[in-house]
Amino acid sequence: MNAVRGRFAARTVRVKAPGKVNVSLNVGPLRPDGYHSVASVYLAVSLYEEVAATSTPGEAITVGISADSTLDLDGVDIPLDERNLAYKAAALMAEVSEHSTGVHLDITKRVPVAGGMGGGSADAAATLLACDALWNSGLSRDELAQLAAELGADVPFALLGGTAVGLGVGDDLSPALAKAQMDWVLVTAEFGLSTPDVFKTLDRLREAEGLDVEEPTAVDPKILQALRSGDPDALSRVLVNDLQRASIELAPTLRDTLGLGESSGAIAGIVSGSGPTIALLAHNPEAAEGLAEELRHKGLTALPVHGPVPGARIISDTLL
């Protein structure tokens, strides 16, 4: 522990990490281990979670939600104990850090909870980076990514950011050289969807239809080509999400939201990940702003964002 004149010296490291949109998501059949292989293109977007990690005496890990959160969290059950992914990230860092202390994690929530955008994964990635700095652990980004993979399939990408191809269960990441800005409008829902429930629903729909699905081993190169060229029209023609119909099966209003988005000026729309957040593609920032305003007038919660953006980054480091 650090000490100043014999007393504990508290320090706060603040990190932000982005949410993501699955620009494409192909899902394989149910595997014997209960998981599904995927082939996905992840895009980190400019809607960020923040974690402020403050060292405390002892070894306890505590979690709180910041009053600066922009989400309406009334009725949203966010566990603040060892079930929380950020708590798990801090506990994992404590195991591998020689000079760990207690820590309080103050999380600013902006990415929809259970919205298919990896908000909890962003919290975990931010916590890994914050605790690494707080405890001077000295881990490389690759070492942090290995720890991230232990926490969940989306956590390594929140650490990496940018654009990446995800294979396996999504954690086998390869950065994609696609830096051209794409503009989106995110339409968030007042409810969440359980990712396991969405996958189970997809399995049920496929079984009922007698579909024989192959393991996905690569993503459509046309998607990466469209992202590299920054051509939203080309991208609109190759957007795909195998989970979308399962999400709509569980929440039929999503079909109406997609239709409303496209009739209001979106080039194309897609359910993000397991949903229920809808990602609507726009031609440019001005078009995204106009689309978001139009949808807000129609009673929806709509946020213009862009991507790709960097992964988890330290934004302040303060000795208290």
Image (cartoon, rainbow, N blue to C red):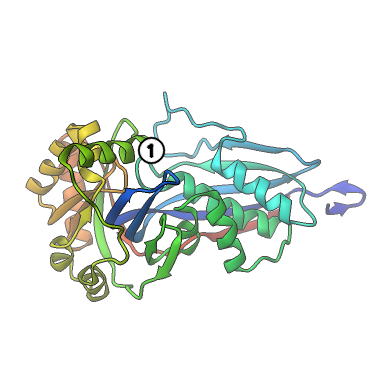
* Residue 262 pos. (x, y %): 10, 48
> In this rendering, is residue 254 above or below 166?
above
- Residue 286 vs residue 157, the one in the foreground: 157
Residue flagged by tag 1: what amino acid is it? Pro
State the residue at coordinates (56%, 48%): 51
**Label 1: which secondary element:** helix
What residue is pinned by disc 1?
196
Q: Quadrant of residue 254?
A: top left
Q: Where residue 240 sits: x, y (%)?
A: 21, 55
Q: Quadrant of residue 209?
A: top left
Q: Position of residue 314 (x, y in %)?
A: 57, 60
Does the image show residue 299? no
Identified at 49% across, 39% down, the residue is 68
Among the 4 quarters of the image, the one containing residue 184: bottom left
Q: Circle 1: is it few (<14), some (14-19), or many (20+) Cα within 10 Å?
A: few
- Residue 234 coordinates in the image, percent (x, y): 14, 68
Residue 163 in view of the camera:
yes
Q: Is residue 320 left or right of residue 149?
A: right
Residue 116 shown left or right of residue 7 in the figure: left
What residue lies at 37% left-to-right and 48% top-to-bottom? 117
Q: How many marks?
A: 1
Q: Farthest residue toward the top?
A: 75
Above or below for 229 versus 237: below
Question: In this image, 56 relative to 66: left or right?
Answer: right
